[in-house]
């Protein structure tokens, strides 16, 4: 049975109002965006190799695609492989939104002495839920006690003193420390031998995974031959990286005001997800599905759906450029109507 991350939480849609969107504004579909646009607003499910740092890999992507800005979501240690979500251009603003999505790793734990399989199975299940961790000595963050959540631990195979297992966890969890603690709980000691990140929210290694070599070849095919098929496969819309977030769809008339930093008023809401609570990081998007901004909810879904006035979400980070939708708001106001 495959475990679930926070991004797998099912949500329904509440229809608050009826409205239509003008096809002359924005993009009518996210499935066939221009390559030039994706090179300024796209994300890549990059397969980080063992050896380089995450920063070095991001720098190589920048050179390969000949772009000004590249940012990754979630640092991997040099020896660790797997998914390194990478934002291009304006999409770097969205990388912070991956934090609540949850991450998955496949790990090889090497025990220092043999232990019965039944005991290994029992102990590893004890490390599910909230756990306390202090970052290891080699970490780059302050070594203070922190709480992180383990969503699931699933043993794949046990061979001698080697334990291959899959772990779903909260961002900021140190799997190296988790391996050490499991070894201590077993009374035999242990350490992390190998680690690969297999998932970050909607990013999965069996879908759209791209190596640096793949990316380089795809870019050359596009530049030299005009063949954009491969590059389009690897350059995904920024909305893909935000698909785990609860969302509020807004009227066309509200879009440009949000792009200018306004907060969202109740009258600008058309549809929204269930399960939103006050303080949640949410996505404000157009009726066409385009990402407009990241925001914080000011109330729960049910009250937002019934609100007749007031601010329902506070804008945190604008993702859409100004002017893609026309100005339909009065100047010198911070409220969307």
Image: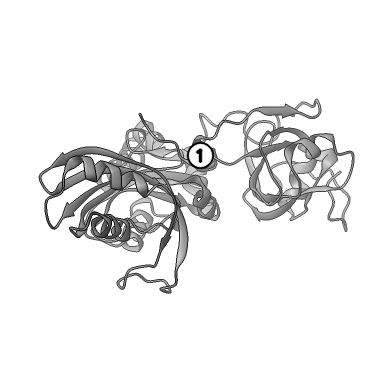
Q: Is residue 150 left or right of residue 272?
A: left
State the image quarter where residue 183 is shown.
Answer: bottom left
Q: Nearer the viewer, residue 153 or 25?
A: 153
* Residue labelled with disc 1: 7
On the image, which quarter does residue 26 sit in? top right
Please report the residue visible at 12 percent of the width from the left and 55 percent of the height from the top: 113
Depicted 19 relative to depicted 110: above or below: above
Residue 337 x %, y % = 87, 43
**What colour-coding does the image apply?**
one colour
Count of labels shown?
1
Q: Nearer the viewer, residue 150 or 304?
A: 150
Location of residue 334 in the rendering, given as x and y in whole percent from the top left corner: 83, 55
Q: Is residue 68 visible?
A: no
User: Which of the two residues, 148 or 272, is positioned nearer the viewer here?
Assistant: 148
Q: Is residue 101 above or below residue 135?
A: above
Q: On the picture, is 254 further left or further right than 89?
A: right
Q: Residues within 10 Å of mark 1 (few under 14, many from 20)?
A: some
Quarter of the image holding residue 265? top right
x and y percentages locating residue 298 in the rendered image: 76, 50
Horizontal side of 315 relative to 48 (left or right) equals right
Residue 244 showing in the rendered view: yes
Q: Nearer the viewer, residue 76 or 224?
A: 76
Image point (23%, 45%), residue name: 120
Quadrant in the picture for the N terminus = top left
> Label 1's element?
helix
Q: Residue at x 67, y 34 (%)?
A: 273
């Amino acid at each position: 049975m495959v475990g679930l991350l926070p991004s797998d939480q099912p949500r329904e849609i509440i229809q608050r109002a009826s409205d239509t969107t003008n096809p002359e504004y924005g993009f009518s579909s996210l499935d066939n965006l221009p390559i030039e646009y994706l090179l300024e607003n796209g994300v890549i499910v990059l397969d980080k190799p063992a050896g380089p740092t995450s920063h070095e890999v991001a720098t190589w992507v920048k050179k390969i695609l000949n772009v000004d800005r590249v940012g990754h979501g979630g640092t991997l240690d040099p020896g660790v492989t797997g998914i390194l979500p990478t934002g291009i251009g304006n999409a770097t603003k969205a990388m912070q939104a991956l934090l609540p999505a949850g991450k998955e790793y496949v790990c090889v734990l090497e025990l220092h002495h043999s232990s019965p399989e039944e005991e290994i199975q029992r102990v590893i299940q004890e490390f599910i839920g909230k756990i306390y961790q202090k970052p290891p000595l080699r970490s780059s963050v302050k070594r203070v006690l922190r709480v992180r959540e383990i969503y699931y631990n699933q043993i794949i195979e046990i061979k001698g003193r080697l334990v291959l297992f899959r772990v779903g966890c909260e961002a900021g969890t140190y799997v190296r420390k988790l391996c050490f603690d499991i070894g201590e709980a077993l009374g035999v000691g242990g350490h992390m031998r190998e680690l690969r990140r297999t998932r970050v929210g909607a990013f999965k290694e069996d879908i759209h995974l791209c190596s640096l070599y793949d990316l380089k070849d795809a870019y050359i095919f596009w530049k030299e031959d005009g063949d954009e098929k491969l590059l389009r496969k690897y350059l995904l819309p920024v909305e893909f990286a935000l698909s785990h977030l609860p969302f509020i769809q807004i009227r066309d008339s509200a879009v440009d005001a949000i792009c200018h930093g306004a907060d969202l008023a109740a009258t600008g809401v058309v549809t929204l997800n269930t399960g939103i609570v006050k303080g949640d990081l949410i996505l404000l998007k157009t009726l066409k599905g385009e990402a407009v901004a990241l925001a914080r909810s000011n109330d729960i879904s049910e009250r937002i759906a019934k609100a007749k006035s007031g601010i329902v979400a506070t804008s945190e980070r604008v993702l859409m450029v100004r002017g893609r939708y026309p100005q339909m708001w009065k100047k010198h106001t911070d409220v969307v109507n």
